[in-house]
Image (spheres, helix red, strand yellow):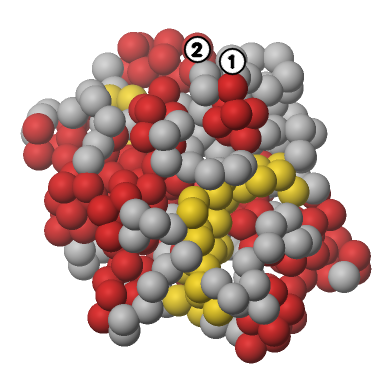
Amino acid sequence: MTSAPTYQDVLNAARRIDGAAIKTPLLTSNILDDFCGARVFLKAENLQRTGSFKFRGAMNSVTAYLEENPDLAKSGVIACSSGNHAQGIAEAARLLNIPATIIMPSDAPQIKVARTRRSGATVLFYDRAKEDRDVVTNAKAEELGAVLIHPYNNPYVMAGQGTCALEAADFFNANDIELDRVFACTGGGGLSAGIALVMQERFSKAQFHTVEPEGFDDYSRSLVSGERLTNATTVGSICDAIITPSPGELSFSILKDFAAEGLVITDDDALRAVAFAFNELKTVVEPGGAAALASLLSNKIDVRGETVLVTLSGGNIDPEMMHKALALD
C-alpha cells in the first residue's frame, strides 16, 4: 500500500493488532472539566505498550509487511525515530521475531534509547542538527536490504495509529455521546491523519485541531497556506516526540481538507501539562505527549459547553524532565 489509507484500512489495522496492542482507557477529570467548562475525555496512549500510540502503527506495519513478504524475517526492518516510533518498531519486530535497526538522534532521551535496545533492536545515531535523518536512514536501509518503515509517512503506520480513535468512537457511540472537538499531538501527522480518518466517518461534524510546539508549527502554517511548509530547524524544543521537518505527504493529503485551526503551545505550556497529568490525573506523560492537553490548559481555544477528545500520546519521560515540570508547576 503506497497511497493514503482509508477508514477501512483502520478497521483492518484494528483486527491485525488485536491481542498485541492495549485498548487504552479514556480518562476524565472533574477538575479539568470545571477548568475548561467542557466534558473532556483523554485517550491515554501513554499507557499503550512501549509507552506511546506508536506501537499501534508499528505493529500494524510490521505485521502487514511480513504478511506480504515472509523473507522479512531475514532482512528485517529499519526505522528513524527520536524514540517512540523506535520503541514501537523494536517491540513489534521482537514479537514477530525479525531483526530491527533504528536510526535515532544523538540527543534522544536515554530512557527511549535504553528501551529500544531492550526490545533487541540495533540502535545507530545521527546528529539531527547537521544530518538529514531520511538520507541517513535510506542509505542504511539499502545497505541492509531492510524494509524502511517511516514514522508517519507510511499508510500502514497511519492506519494503525487511527485505531486509538476507533476505540474512542466506539465508546462514544455506545454511550450516545456526541463529540464536538478533537485535539491531537502532531509531529509529522501520522496520528492526526489516522484519527481524522475515523472522525470523518464517525463524527464528521467534530472540529479537529493539530497541536504543535512553538517554533515547530509546520502543520499549523501548512494548513493555512494549503501546501506543505518546513520548519527552520529540527532542534530547540523539549517536545522531541513531535519535532519533524515538515508534514508528511500522505498525512497532509488527509488533513488539509479536514483539520481546523492548528494550535501552537510553548515548552512551558507542555511542562505545566505534564505536571497537571501527574498531580491531577495520576498518570505520567512526556512533553510531546502532553501537547494536546497543554492547548486546553493554556486556553488556546474556547471549548465551553463542548465534549472534546484529547490525546495523551506518550509517557516516555526522563526523571530529570519530570522534575523540571513539577518544579515549574
Identity of the residue drawn at 62% across and 35% down: 220
Q: Camera-side residue: 201 or 278?
A: 201
Point out which mark residue 135 bears.
2
Q: CA distance from mark 2 to mark 1?
A: 5 Å
Dot 2: what SS?
Answer: helix
Q: Is residue 27 above or below residue 215?
A: below
What amino acid is at disc 1? Asp
How many other residues sit within 10 Å of disc 2, few (<14), some (14-19) or many (≥20)?
Answer: few
Residue 231: where, in percent of width, then height?
A: 68, 23
Q: Quadrant of the N terminus?
A: top left
Q: Camera-side residue: 210 or 71?
A: 210
Residue 105: where, in percent of width, then height?
A: 62, 31
Q: Quadrant of the C terminus?
A: bottom right
Q: 107 left or right of 23? A: right
Quadrant assignment, res 148:
top left
> Label 1 near label 2: C-beta < 8 Å?
yes
Identity of the residue drawn at 69% across and 57% down: 301
Point out which mark residue 132 bears.
1
Point out which mark residue 144 bears.
none
Q: Is residue 254 above or below residue 89?
A: above
Residue 318: where, in percent of width, then height?
A: 71, 58
Name the residue at the bottom extreme: 30
What amino acid is at disc 2? Val
